[in-house]
Amino acid sequence: MSNDPVIGHGAKSDMRMFTGLAASRGFVAGPVFLFHSTANDQIPEYRVEPEQLAHELARLTDAFALTRTQIRSLAIELSKRISGDEATIFDGHLMILDDPSFIGSCKEKVSREQFNAETAVNSVSEKYSSIFAAMDDAYLKERAKDVGDISKRIIRNLLGGADAQAFRVEQPCIVVADELTPSETISMPKNLILGFATDRGSNTSHASLLARALGIPAVVGLGSLSEIVKTGDLLLLDGTRGKVILNPGREERQAFEKMVARSKSIEEKLEQGKLAPGATSDGHAVPMLANVDHNTPMTGLYAVGAEGVGLYRSEYLWLTMDREPTEEEQSHAYTAAARSLPDGQPVTIRALDIGGDKMTKGASASSHKEANPFLGNRSIRYLLRNPEVFKRQLRAILRASVRGNVQLMYPMVSTIEELRAANLELRACMTEMKAEGIPFNEHIKRGVMVEVPAAALIADALARESDFFSIGTNDLIQYTLAVDRLNETVARLYQPTHPAVLQLIALTVKAAHDHALKVSVCGETAADPVMAVLMIGMGVDELSMSPNLIPLVKKIISQVSFVDAQALAETVRRMNNAPADKVYAFCRNQVMKLAPDLLYLQ
């Protein structure tokens, strides 16, 4: 749809409709708050006299320190509001701030070239951003935006603006901007921001990921909206279909109000049915599990209808402490999770998944220097290379296993040798603990995360020495298609319905079922109602996702029969020659016919 003016019966002459990307679902209406980033503000540039250099360097050091404090505060605030991968978005910011070469280059600009601090930071950040942007590695390429976000904040602090300029709003509003950085997004006063709409951005940008995690309706990629609106204009925002209407007429407002009412009615139905066990309309059981970490309020899982924990991200203990937690600290956290769930509900603890985009100061220093950390010493590889770290975690998990239905899951397994080596370490810990008289569940279930194509291709061999499988679709898609989902330049290639991805999932499911094992999906695919239906039709037994998304997926699944899900999967299997986006569109249309509420919920 074009973004040309749309004039309707009873509409104001300046009404306009824009179509962008649906970044975060929801319907909101309210006045515009036009946010102008300081990115394009004039940065003062001048020479510093020799006698003033010490003062200028002190200003620079203070600005870096203040920025570090602000980012850490934002990270803490974010961890209180959400959990999961999105909660670590600011880790990359802190790594850049702590890089001695970054501040060192800024200081050199001041001391040797006698630039003022603002000019030095701007010059160095532009250089760093261009270097990151030119890299082939998608993860490192994303750091260019982090550098830009950080430099804006440092310069604001140098100019004395700090965060005061960010969002001076006094009433509920919809934020309109050219683009929003992660720090700007989390800095929004949560009680006053109804939604946001931006000219630029993608569904996989950090701001979009945060919007979804925080439950803020958002539309991005709108083109030139911020150049047209004024603060106070009325905006209707449809974050479900990616549309906004500026200064709508009466008919548009009435139609939008009906959509909002329908959405609220469906949301109320979600509340009514969320405590029922997950199942299709014809009674095929599909347990809905939660992805959590130690910060997740475990007592709240019952309220959203979770039937256990399908993925306990143990690495967030490391990331929060920025060091390795002791065996006692780990055991306490795992035991608390196990005790908080009703009897019989599983708590599947993923062994330390460190490396790639998740590193701590306590992890191997060499890991920071890897040219491509996503293909390097991470996850099970890191654990097997650091057996003492692995041993302490295994002992902690075993200690917790007598307090509930605790299961152990190995991440990033790619060879049968890795699985055997991990199980050997587990047996050694069991022997040691038995000699020490420490109780544990000798029959604790051990599972494998299928996250790389190699694991899917040898799934039959892995199944012979495992108790269950869990498919991590985020990494499986990334490694199969060589695409970083957080990199906006290639995000369009991140396609869960790519035939290669679906074939690997089918291989995994078949191998699991051939050996009477259950298989779950714990990546973002599980939280997409369309993909959830397809996964069920392909034979996936359980779905695990962020707790707040369980009612939505459970509602849609309850409206679709297992027979219809299987029929959808069979049709998709025959669509090998169709483009992935066409396959997804077909699936969505089919699920919409079976569950019309999806129009208002997804």
Image (cartoon, grey):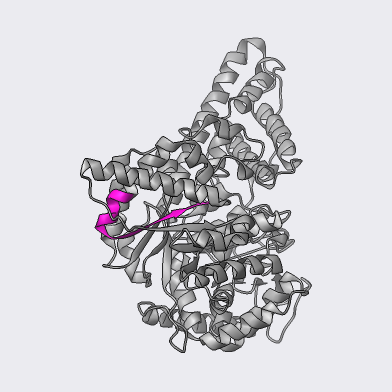
Range shown magenta: 398-412
Q: x, y percentage for residue 500? A: 69, 65
Residue, x 50% and y 29% (percent of image)?
A: 65
Q: Considering the image in quadrants, where does the N terminus appear?
A: bottom right
Q: Relative to 107, is 399 on the left or the right?
A: left
* Residue 41 visible in the shown view: yes
In the rendered structure, does residue 361 fall within the stretch colored magenta?
no
Q: Considering the image in quadrants, where does the C terminus appear?
A: bottom right
Outermost residue toward the left in this view: 437
Q: Determine which quarter of the picture holds residue 372.
A: top right
Q: Nearer the viewer, residue 548 or 409?
A: 409
As drawn, 108 above or below 330:
above
Residue, x 55% and y 60% (percent of image)?
A: 461
Residue, x 32% and y 47% (percent of image)?
A: 430
Q: Nearer the viewer, residue 16 or 434?
A: 434
* Residue 161 visible in the shown view: no
Q: Determine which quarter of the picture holds residue 220.
A: bottom right
In the rendered structure, does residue 401 fall within the stretch colored magenta?
yes
Outermost residue toward the top in this view: 51
Q: x, y percentage for residue 382? A: 51, 40
Q: x, y percentage for residue 354? A: 50, 43
Q: Total number of numbered labels?
A: 0
Q: Nearer the viewer, residue 505 or 526?
A: 505
Q: x, y percentage for residue 20? A: 69, 67
Residue, x 48% and y 51% (percent of image)?
A: 87
